[in-house]
Amino acid sequence: MAVSVRLDPVVEAKLTQQATLLGITKSDFIKDAIARVLGIKNPATLLKQARKSGKMGRPRASASVAATMKARLRAKRPD
């Protein structure tokens, strides 16, 4: 069954961001959220499924944290 929901622009932006980070569609994100709220899905089971899928956000993000922070600090204080 199709259901239409109007979201506040801020909520929609956060939804898009989180779904992208998890590598799932907005529709799947919403379905999972509703199932968890209704007690149909266990959050621990969802976490195990997400970890098994292999795609969780930006896997290389932590590799460049130090370089990114140094660059930002140097930009603020170009001694």
Image (cartoon, rainbow, N blue to C red):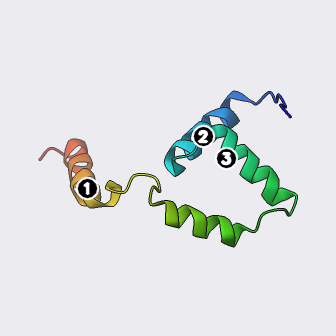
Q: Are marks 3 and 1 in contact (CB under 8 Å)?
A: no
Mark 1 residue crowding within 10 angstroms, few (<14) / some (14–19) / many (20+): few
Task: Kindly report which numbered mark, 1 or 2, lies closer to the viewer in this rendering.
Answer: 2
Total of numbered circles in the picture? 3
Which residue does the numbered mark 1 point to in the structure image? 64
Farthest-out residue, left: 79
Q: Which mark is residue 25?
A: 2
**The disc labelled 3 sits on which kind of residue?**
Phe
73 relative position to 16: left or right: left
**Mark 3: secondary structure:** helix
**Which quarter of the image is occupied by the N terminus?**
top right
**Mark 2: secondary structure:** loop
**The disc labelled 2 sits on which kind of residue?**
Thr
Residue at point 67%, 45% (across, down): 28
The alpha-carbon separation of the residues under discs 3 and 2 comes to 6 Å
Mark 3 residue crowding within 10 angstroms, few (<14) / some (14–19) / many (20+): some
Residue at point 78%, 63% (across, down): 41
Name the foreground residue: 53 vs 58: 53
Q: Are marks 3 and 2 in contact (CB under 8 Å)?
A: yes
Question: Residue 63: horizontal and vertical position, in percent?
Answer: 27, 60
Task: Kindly report which numbered mark, 3 or 1, lies closer to the viewer in this rendering.
Answer: 3
Q: Which mark is residue 29?
A: 3
**The disc labelled 1 sits on which kind of residue?**
Ser
Name the foreground residue: 78 vs 60: 60
**Mark 1: secondary structure:** helix
The alpha-carbon separation of the residues under discs 1 and 2 comes to 27 Å
Question: Residue 10: horizontal and vertical position, in percent?
Answer: 66, 33
Mark 2 residue crowding within 10 angstroms, few (<14) / some (14–19) / many (20+): some
Name the foreground residue: 64 vs 79: 64
Residue at point 31%, 55% (across, down): 60
